[in-house]
Image (cartoon, rainbow, N blue to C red):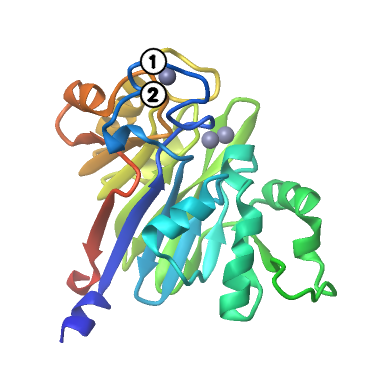
């Protein structure tokens, strides 16, 4: 009985909630970087979804190995990529262990441009003739529109991120909008707001208070969270500008600060 119940849940884990340099930042002695609160230790931004029929990872950060070990993950069915910035792809080679455990190449999903950049850097993983045991091998799938993985519908959300655009993702099931993930964005255009309207949980880029060319500010992220009517929102991709407790204190009801290891679940049996 308990197995049946747990099989009906989608569990989401925030693997990392930090900006590209992580928190603490190398060589910084500020109060945030020296904080002993575990929530002020932010690895690079990523999430993991455990659904009844698929385990999905979003991005392979430079901290991927530590994130995987921390959460004791041992099986991945698919990896989605938001964009090819270093803080979102540089842990890619650590996928090798999953190829070894699972005995087959890993399906990866991203825009054509993102997959091209990943292939340029990790070319050996894309060569089907390369049969070296223990190497990472992947099967690339270009995202051109909504698709489905293990009973979860995934809608790509194109958002501006400075000179480039990134993909966010809306995860739904049976018409229920469960989770929207927008890790790196400078704005959220109207068509995306319409797609994620009244989403149950929104995880959104809330870099810092000071404006940034390629990221939303905290105020910008809060504006989006309230405008789309998300039931619960979490800020991610945070800098060392403020401690977790101080940041959390300033936010309106329904908007929280993500932290590494944060978990929440959706009861799919209700669908
Ligand atoms: Zn980033
Ligand atoms: Zn600092
Ligand atoms: Zn980026």
Mark yes or no: residue 156 visible: yes
Where disc 1 sits, the SS reads loop
Find residue 10 and report its image quarter.
bottom left
Left-right relation of 147 to 37: right
Q: Is mark 1 within 8 Å of ligand 2?
A: yes
Residues at badges 1 and 2 in contact (C-beta under 8 Å)? yes
What residue appears at the point 35 percent right and 42 percent down from the top-left corner? 203
Find residue 163 and report its image quarter.
top right
- Give the quarter the ligand 2 occupies: top left
Image quadrant occupied by the C terminus: bottom left
Mark yes or no: residue 199 visible: no
What residue appears at the point 55 percent right and 61 percent down from the top-left corner? 79
On the image, the x and y values in percent for residue 165 come to 60, 36
Q: Residues within 10 Å of mark 2 (few under 14, many from 20)?
A: many
Q: Residues within 10 Å of mark 1 (few under 14, many from 20)?
A: few
Closer to us: 41 or 212: 41
Mark 2, residue position: 33
Closer to us: 54 or 16: 16
Q: Is mark 2 within 8 Å of ligand 2?
A: yes
Find residue 86 and report its image quarter.
top right
């Amino acid at each position: 009985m308990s197995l049946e119940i747990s099989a009906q849940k989608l569990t989401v884990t925030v693997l990392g909630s930090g900006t590209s340099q992580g928190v603490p930042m190398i060589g910084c002695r500020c109060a945030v970087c020296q904080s002993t609160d575990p929530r002020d230790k932010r690895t690079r931004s990523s999430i993991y979804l455990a659904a009844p029929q698929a385990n999905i990872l979003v991005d392979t950060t430079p901290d991927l190995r530590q994130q995987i070990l921390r959460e004791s993950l041992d099986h991945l069915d698919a990896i989605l990529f938001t964009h090819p910035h270093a803080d979102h792809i540089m842990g890619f080679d650590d996928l090798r262990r999953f190829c070894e455990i699972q005995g087959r190449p890993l399906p990866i999903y991203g825009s054509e441009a993102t997959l091209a950049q990943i292939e340029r850097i990790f070319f050996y993983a894309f060569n089907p003739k390369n049969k070296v045991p223990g190497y990472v091998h992947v099967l690339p799938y270009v995202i051109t529109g909504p698709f489905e993985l293990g009973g979860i519908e995934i809608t790509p959300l194109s958002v501006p991120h400075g000179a480039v655009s990134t993909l966010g993702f809306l995860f739904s099931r049976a018409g229920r909008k469960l989770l929207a993930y927008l890790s790196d964005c400078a704005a959220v255009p109207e068509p995306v707001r319409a797609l994620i309207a009244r989403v149950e949980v929104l995880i959104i880029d809330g870099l810092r208070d000071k404006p940034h060319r390629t990221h939303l500010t905290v105020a910008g992220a809060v504006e989006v969270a309230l405008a789309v009517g998300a039931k619960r929102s979490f800020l991610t991709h945070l800098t060392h500008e403020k401690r977790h407790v101080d940041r959390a204190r300033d936010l309106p009801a329904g908007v929280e600060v993500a932290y590494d290891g944060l978990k929440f679940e959706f009861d799919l049996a209700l669908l």
